[in-house]
Amino acid sequence: MTFSKTTTELSETLQDIPPGFLNTMGYVDRSEVNGPGCRAVVWVQGCLRACPGCFNPASWSFEPNQLITIDDLVERILSEPRNEGVTFSGGEPFWQASALAEVARRVKEQGLNVMSFSGFTLEQLQSKSAPPESQALLAQLDILVDGPYVESLAINDPSSPVSSKNQRVRVFNPALKERITWASDQLEVHVLKDGSRIFTGYQGQIGVFE
Ligand code: SF4
Protein backbone atom coordinates (compact mmCIF):
# COMPACT_ATOMS: atom_id res chain seq x y z
CA MET A 1 0.00 0.00 0.00
CA THR A 2 1.38 3.42 -0.89
CA PHE A 3 0.17 6.84 0.10
CA SER A 4 0.99 9.75 -2.15
CA LYS A 5 -1.08 12.73 -1.05
CA THR A 6 0.70 16.05 -1.70
CA THR A 7 0.94 18.74 0.96
CA THR A 8 -1.62 20.82 -0.97
CA GLU A 9 -4.06 17.91 -1.16
CA LEU A 10 -3.43 17.27 2.51
CA SER A 11 -4.32 20.87 3.39
CA GLU A 12 -7.55 20.55 1.41
CA THR A 13 -8.46 17.29 3.13
CA LEU A 14 -7.71 18.68 6.57
CA GLN A 15 -10.08 21.54 5.76
CA ASP A 16 -12.84 18.92 5.39
CA ILE A 17 -12.63 18.41 9.15
CA PRO A 18 -15.01 20.94 10.72
CA PRO A 19 -13.53 23.34 13.28
CA GLY A 20 -13.72 21.90 16.77
CA PHE A 21 -13.59 18.31 15.53
CA LEU A 22 -10.92 15.62 15.43
CA ASN A 23 -10.64 12.92 12.80
CA THR A 24 -9.91 9.68 14.64
CA MET A 25 -9.67 5.98 13.86
CA GLY A 26 -9.99 4.51 17.33
CA TYR A 27 -10.30 5.04 21.05
CA VAL A 28 -10.01 2.93 24.18
CA ASP A 29 -11.09 4.07 27.62
CA ARG A 30 -8.36 2.32 29.61
CA SER A 31 -5.02 0.98 28.43
CA GLU A 32 -1.90 -0.06 30.32
CA VAL A 33 0.39 -0.61 27.32
CA ASN A 34 0.42 2.85 25.74
CA GLY A 35 2.22 4.94 28.35
CA PRO A 36 2.56 5.25 32.14
CA GLY A 37 -0.17 3.70 34.24
CA CYS A 38 -3.77 3.43 33.14
CA ARG A 39 -4.79 5.85 30.35
CA ALA A 40 -7.17 6.63 27.54
CA VAL A 41 -5.75 6.26 24.03
CA VAL A 42 -6.82 8.26 20.97
CA TRP A 43 -5.67 7.05 17.55
CA VAL A 44 -5.96 9.88 15.04
CA GLN A 45 -6.64 9.34 11.35
CA GLY A 46 -4.05 10.40 8.78
CA CYS A 47 -0.31 9.95 8.23
CA LEU A 48 1.86 10.82 5.22
CA ARG A 49 4.84 8.70 6.12
CA ALA A 50 4.01 5.22 4.80
CA CYS A 51 6.74 3.56 6.87
CA PRO A 52 7.48 0.02 5.64
CA GLY A 53 6.22 -2.37 8.29
CA CYS A 54 3.74 0.17 9.75
CA PHE A 55 1.29 -1.67 11.98
CA ASN A 56 -1.56 0.75 11.32
CA PRO A 57 -1.78 1.28 7.54
CA ALA A 58 -5.52 1.88 7.91
CA SER A 59 -4.55 5.11 9.68
CA TRP A 60 -2.77 6.59 6.63
CA SER A 61 -5.78 8.03 4.81
CA PHE A 62 -6.81 11.56 5.78
CA GLU A 63 -10.40 11.05 4.68
CA PRO A 64 -12.89 11.64 7.51
CA ASN A 65 -13.33 8.49 9.60
CA GLN A 66 -14.63 8.81 13.16
CA LEU A 67 -15.22 12.53 13.72
CA ILE A 68 -15.57 13.62 17.33
CA THR A 69 -15.82 17.08 18.84
CA ILE A 70 -13.15 18.33 21.19
CA ASP A 71 -15.84 18.73 23.86
CA ASP A 72 -17.03 15.13 23.52
CA LEU A 73 -13.50 13.74 23.51
CA VAL A 74 -12.53 15.67 26.64
CA GLU A 75 -15.71 14.50 28.37
CA ARG A 76 -15.03 10.91 27.39
CA ILE A 77 -11.44 10.98 28.64
CA LEU A 78 -12.47 12.54 31.96
CA SER A 79 -15.34 10.07 32.45
CA GLU A 80 -12.94 7.26 33.40
CA PRO A 81 -11.67 8.10 36.91
CA ARG A 82 -9.04 5.35 36.91
CA ASN A 83 -7.05 7.02 34.17
CA GLU A 84 -4.05 9.15 35.04
CA GLY A 85 -3.65 10.44 31.53
CA VAL A 86 -4.25 10.20 27.80
CA THR A 87 -2.02 9.10 24.93
CA PHE A 88 -2.31 10.37 21.35
CA SER A 89 -1.25 7.86 18.71
CA GLY A 90 -1.91 7.39 15.06
CA GLY A 91 -1.75 8.15 12.31
CA GLU A 92 0.20 11.31 12.94
CA PRO A 93 -1.09 13.33 15.90
CA PHE A 94 0.78 16.49 14.88
CA TRP A 95 -1.31 16.94 11.70
CA GLN A 96 -4.16 17.69 14.11
CA ALA A 97 -1.99 19.52 16.62
CA SER A 98 -4.30 22.46 17.22
CA ALA A 99 -7.30 20.35 18.27
CA LEU A 100 -5.16 17.92 20.29
CA ALA A 101 -3.45 20.82 22.08
CA GLU A 102 -6.88 22.01 23.18
CA VAL A 103 -7.86 18.51 24.35
CA ALA A 104 -4.56 18.26 26.23
CA ARG A 105 -4.94 21.67 27.85
CA ARG A 106 -8.40 20.81 29.14
CA VAL A 107 -7.60 17.36 30.54
CA LYS A 108 -4.43 18.70 32.17
CA GLU A 109 -6.53 21.29 33.96
CA GLN A 110 -8.22 18.28 35.58
CA GLY A 111 -4.91 16.76 36.68
CA LEU A 112 -4.24 14.25 33.89
CA ASN A 113 -0.92 13.88 32.08
CA VAL A 114 -0.58 13.78 28.29
CA MET A 115 1.67 11.75 26.05
CA SER A 116 1.96 11.59 22.27
CA PHE A 117 3.64 9.46 19.68
CA SER A 118 4.91 11.13 16.50
CA GLY A 119 6.63 10.03 13.30
CA PHE A 120 8.40 13.42 13.33
CA THR A 121 11.51 13.89 15.42
CA LEU A 122 11.44 16.49 18.16
CA GLU A 123 13.85 18.62 16.13
CA GLN A 124 11.49 18.54 13.12
CA LEU A 125 8.55 19.47 15.34
CA GLN A 126 10.51 22.46 16.65
CA SER A 127 11.48 23.62 13.15
CA LYS A 128 9.69 26.03 10.81
CA SER A 129 8.59 23.17 8.57
CA ALA A 130 6.62 21.46 11.37
CA PRO A 131 2.87 20.93 10.93
CA PRO A 132 0.78 23.96 12.00
CA GLU A 133 0.44 24.47 15.76
CA SER A 134 3.03 21.83 16.60
CA GLN A 135 4.49 24.13 19.25
CA ALA A 136 1.12 24.44 20.93
CA LEU A 137 0.83 20.66 21.25
CA LEU A 138 4.46 20.22 22.30
CA ALA A 139 3.93 22.77 25.06
CA GLN A 140 1.19 20.58 26.56
CA LEU A 141 3.03 17.25 26.47
CA ASP A 142 4.45 15.44 29.48
CA ILE A 143 6.01 12.75 27.27
CA LEU A 144 6.75 12.56 23.54
CA VAL A 145 7.87 9.38 21.76
CA ASP A 146 9.36 10.71 18.55
CA GLY A 147 10.66 9.34 15.29
CA PRO A 148 9.17 7.06 12.64
CA TYR A 149 9.02 3.29 12.90
CA VAL A 150 12.06 1.90 11.02
CA GLU A 151 11.58 -1.77 10.26
CA SER A 152 15.31 -2.52 9.99
CA LEU A 153 15.81 -1.08 13.49
CA ALA A 154 12.84 -2.89 15.06
CA ILE A 155 13.06 -3.88 18.72
CA ASN A 156 11.17 -6.90 19.99
CA ASP A 157 12.13 -6.62 23.63
CA PRO A 158 9.54 -7.07 26.39
CA SER A 159 11.11 -4.21 28.34
CA SER A 160 11.36 -1.65 25.52
CA PRO A 161 8.96 1.34 25.49
CA VAL A 162 9.74 2.03 21.80
CA SER A 163 9.33 -0.05 18.66
CA SER A 164 12.53 0.79 16.77
CA LYS A 165 15.98 1.88 17.92
CA ASN A 166 15.83 5.35 16.35
CA GLN A 167 12.81 6.38 18.45
CA ARG A 168 13.29 8.41 21.63
CA VAL A 169 11.21 8.83 24.77
CA ARG A 170 11.32 12.53 25.66
CA VAL A 171 10.13 13.10 29.22
CA PHE A 172 9.25 16.78 29.69
CA ASN A 173 7.61 16.26 33.10
CA PRO A 174 10.25 15.26 35.69
CA ALA A 175 7.57 13.58 37.83
CA LEU A 176 7.27 10.89 35.13
CA LYS A 177 10.99 10.17 34.71
CA GLU A 178 10.76 6.88 36.60
CA ARG A 179 7.48 5.85 34.92
CA ILE A 180 8.81 4.70 31.56
CA THR A 181 7.78 1.16 32.34
CA TRP A 182 5.36 0.17 29.59
CA ALA A 183 6.57 -2.39 27.04
CA SER A 184 6.05 -1.95 23.31
CA ASP A 185 5.48 -5.65 22.62
CA GLN A 186 2.66 -6.29 25.07
CA LEU A 187 -0.84 -6.76 23.74
CA GLU A 188 -4.26 -5.76 25.07
CA VAL A 189 -7.64 -6.85 23.76
CA HIS A 190 -10.59 -4.51 24.39
CA VAL A 191 -14.12 -5.80 23.82
CA LEU A 192 -16.44 -2.86 23.17
CA LYS A 193 -20.14 -2.61 24.04
CA ASP A 194 -21.16 -3.26 20.43
CA GLY A 195 -19.17 -6.50 20.41
CA SER A 196 -16.31 -5.22 18.26
CA ARG A 197 -12.77 -5.74 19.51
CA ILE A 198 -9.69 -3.54 19.53
CA PHE A 199 -6.24 -5.05 19.80
CA THR A 200 -3.60 -2.58 20.96
CA GLY A 201 -0.17 -2.32 22.44
CA TYR A 202 2.05 -4.37 20.21
CA GLN A 203 4.41 -1.75 18.73
CA GLY A 204 1.66 0.85 18.76
CA GLN A 205 -0.68 -1.40 16.81
CA ILE A 206 -4.41 -0.94 16.71
CA GLY A 207 -6.61 -3.54 15.10
CA VAL A 208 -10.38 -3.14 14.96
CA PHE A 209 -12.50 -6.24 14.42
CA GLU A 210 -16.28 -6.14 14.11
S1 SF4 B 1 4.52 3.77 11.66
FE1 SF4 B 1 3.51 5.65 12.44
S2 SF4 B 1 4.58 7.29 11.33
FE2 SF4 B 1 4.96 5.40 10.17
S3 SF4 B 1 3.33 5.27 8.60
FE3 SF4 B 1 2.65 4.11 10.42
S4 SF4 B 1 1.40 5.60 11.58
FE4 SF4 B 1 2.68 6.78 10.16
Image (cartoon, grey):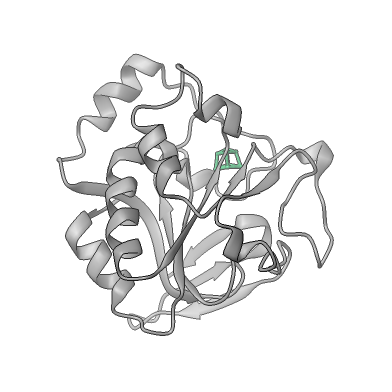
Ligand 1 image position (quadrant): top right
Residue 210 lies in what quarter of the image? bottom left
Q: Quadrant of the N terminus?
A: top right
Residue in view at x 48 percent, y 72 percent: 39
From this view, report whether residue 183 is shown above or below residue 122: below
33 left or right, relative to 5: right
Residue in view at x 15 percent, y 40 percent: 18
Pinpoint residue 79: horizontal percent, then vertical percent. Answer: 29, 79
Residue 50 visible in the displayed image: no
Residue 200 lies in what quarter of the image? bottom right
* Farthest front residue in view: 174
Residue 53 visible in the displayed image: yes
Residue in view at x 46 percent, y 74 percent: 84
Pinpoint residue 38: horizontal percent, then vertical percent. Answer: 52, 77
From this view, report whether residue 112 is shown above or below residue 15: below
Residue in view at x 33 percent, y 48 percent: 100
Pinpoint residue 174: horizontal percent, then vertical percent. Answer: 60, 59
